[in-house]
């Protein structure tokens, strides 16, 4: 159990930092696009596609962080109306369904990358597979985070407290 949580802590940090980096890159590229278009009257042909690709990567990598922080779309209204035991079962059911969904994205995303790898982003002159690779990579990080959430939610309260204390020390 501790191994799963430790691995997830590392992978979530990697995914979060990469997502933030891609978001910063997308912001810089978008500013560059606006400046070249409106200040110089000569828009860059490649920055829009690069910014769009960076945003795609930021979104898919950011899923891991949102799962870890509990910020994914929740069914709080329904959960608050249920007894605690049923609310916990519903929360685990949503985690399990999300795990299935992201597992499917890993498999079919990898197949999609393989299928489109021969196509080229014309403005960047690189394979469009690099953009589509965000799907299986980000989904893989999400799967790891969801497994850890299932482990955390089903761990005894003392173990959850120890994990919470350990995370506070690391921050």
Image (cartoon, rainbow, N blue to C red):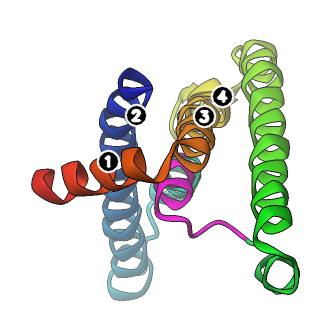
Label 3, secondary structure: give it.
helix
| Picture residue at 46% right of the left edge, 53% below the top | 157
Residue occupying image coordinates x 76% and y 50%: 92
Q: Which is closer to the viewer, label 4 or label 2?
A: 2
Label 3 and label 4: CA atoms lie apart by 16 Å
- Residue bearing the label numbered 4: 136
Q: Is residue 72 magenta?
A: yes
Name the residue that disc number 1 marks. 163
Image spot of residue 48 (x, y percent): 53, 60
Q: Is-magenta flag for residue 39?
A: no
Q: Quadrant of the N terminus?
A: top left
Residue 164: where, in percent of width, then height?
31, 56
Q: Secondary structure at mark 2?
A: helix
Label 1, secondary structure: give it.
helix
Q: Residues within 10 Å of mark 1 (few under 14, many from 20)?
A: some
- Sequence-wise, the earlier of marks 3 and 4 is 4
Q: What residue is disc 2 on? A: 5
Q: Which element is circle 4 on?
A: helix
- Range of residues picked out in magenta: 61-73
Q: Residue at x 11, y 55 (%)?
A: 169
| 86 sits left or right of 170 in the view | right
**Dot 1 and dot 2 residues touching (CB under 8 Å):** yes
Asked if disc 3 and disc 4 are in contact, CB closer than 8 Å, the reply is no
Few, some or many residues within 10 Å of mark 2 (<14, 14–19, 20+): some
């Amino acid at each position: 159990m501790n191994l799963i949580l430790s691995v997830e802590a590392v992978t979530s940090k990697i995914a979060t930092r990469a997502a933030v980096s891609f978001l910063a890159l997308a912001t810089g590229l978008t500013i560059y696009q606006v400046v070249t278009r409106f200040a110089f009257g000569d828009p860059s042909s490649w920055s829009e596609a690069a910014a769009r690709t960076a945003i795609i990567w930021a979104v898919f990598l950011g899923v891991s962080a949102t799962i870890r922080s509990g910020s994914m779309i929740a069914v709080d209204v329904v959960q608050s109306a249920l007894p605690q035991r049923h609310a916990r079962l519903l929360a685990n059911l949503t985690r399990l369904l999300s795990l299935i969904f992201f597992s499917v994205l890993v498999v079919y995303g990898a197949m999609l990358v393989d299928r489109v790898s021969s196509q080229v982003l014309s403005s960047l002159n690189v394979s469009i597979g690099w953009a589509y690779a965000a799907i299986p990579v980000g989904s893989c990080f999400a799967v790891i985070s969801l497994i850890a959430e299932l482990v955390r939610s089903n761990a005894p309260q003392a173990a959850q407290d120890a994990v919470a204390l350990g995370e506070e020390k690391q921050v």
